Amino acid sequence: RMRAYFGEPVSFYFAWLNFYTRSLILPAVVGVAVYACYWLQYEIYLTFLIPGYAGVTMIWSTTFIETWKGRETVLRKQWNADALVLGEEARKGFRGKLDSGFYLSDGLWVPMQQEDVTALRERGVPALIPSGKRSNQFAKHVKVLSG
């Protein structure tokens, strides 16, 4: 209902805000536990908890970003909002060329012409710059469609 009233950009913002708020539960619980150990002055605090909390935060942030990308893709399909452009734009002072393409699972960049990108979108390929499991699936789509 909110999407019909406010439109996709506002709905994506609130979907992200909801997702972010729910995702903060894990780092909040771990942070409270670490602070409690600091407050109770356990010696284990300096040797294990600070580096452990930093590691948990690092893993959580990476997982959060990748999970949101998947959630955003699902919402785009449900709301039929593939043409909606959200996210980063080239900054005004950027001098250079913006390349179209995707990353393979081993981190290699595969450049594509804009016409190929448009053709893949029209055929329903899920994402242009996928990550994780989707990159293998994307590479299979490209292989099938190109050859």
Image: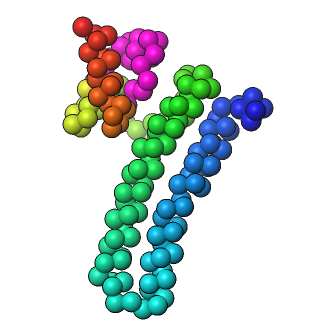
Residue 104 percent coordinates (x, y): 26, 31
Query: Which one is in front, 45 or 8?
Result: 45
Viewer-closest of 96 and 43 = 43
Residue occupying the far top of the picture: 147
Is residue 96 visible from the viewing direction of this image?
Answer: no
In the image, residue 28 above or below residue 138:
below
In percent of width and height, residue 136 lies at 29, 28
Seen from the viewer's position, the closer of residues 36 and 86 is 36
Image x and y of residue 111, in percent = 28, 24
In this rendering, would 51 be left or right of 67? Answer: left
Is 91 included in the stretch rendered in magenta?
no
Residue 38 is drawn in which quadrant? Answer: bottom left
Residue at 46%, 39% (x, y): give it.
Answer: 69
In this view, which residue lies farthest toward the right? 5
What residue is drawn where x is 48% and y is 72%? 31
**Image position, residue 33 (x, y; %):** 47, 76
Numbered range of the magenta stretch: 112-129
